Amino acid sequence: MRASDEDRRRVITVLQRHTEAGRLTLDEFSERAGTVYSARTMDELRGAIADLPALAPSAPAPLPPESHDGRQLLLTFALAIGALIVIGVVYTLIK
């Protein structure tokens, strides 16, 4: 079966992760990347990673801290309304 550009990108990602883990040197990565980019079939792509262990699924990226902007805006609005009510009551009492 013919390999697509997306298939090549996936294999390069696997090679990068193995290089980051210390299983491949930069020279080995470079050599295998050349093989991947020149591969025409899926078998050629599999050959570039055949001797490497399967990778554990990558952990999802940590979520950014929860944003409290909505709550903060609501609290600010409530305080502004409260201040207007107090000002109105005080103004009415002073008259």
Image (cartoon, helix red, strand yellow):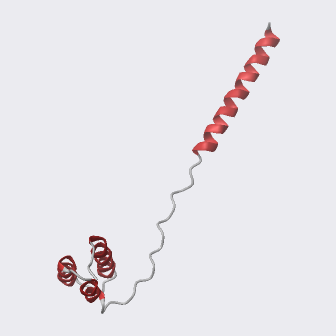
- Choose top left, top right, bottom left or bottom right for residue 65: bottom right
- Which of 70 and 38 lies nearest the eye of the viewer? 38
Quarter of the figure that contains the C terminus: top right
Indicate the position of residue 7 as horizontal and vertical percent values: 31, 75
- Side (left or right) of 25 relative to 86: left
- Side (left or right) of 82 relative to 29: right
- Choose top left, top right, bottom left or bottom right for residue 38: bottom left
Indicate the position of residue 40 as horizontal and vertical percent values: 21, 80
The residue furthest top is: 95
The residue furthest bottom is: 51
Q: Is residue 75 above or below residue 27?
A: above
- Side (left or right) of 67 relative to 47: right
Indicate the position of residue 89 as horizontal and vertical percent values: 79, 18
Quarter of the figure that contains the N terminus: bottom left
Q: Residue at x 69, y 32 (%)?
A: 79
- Choose top left, top right, bottom left or bottom right for residue 39: bottom left
The residue furthest right is: 93
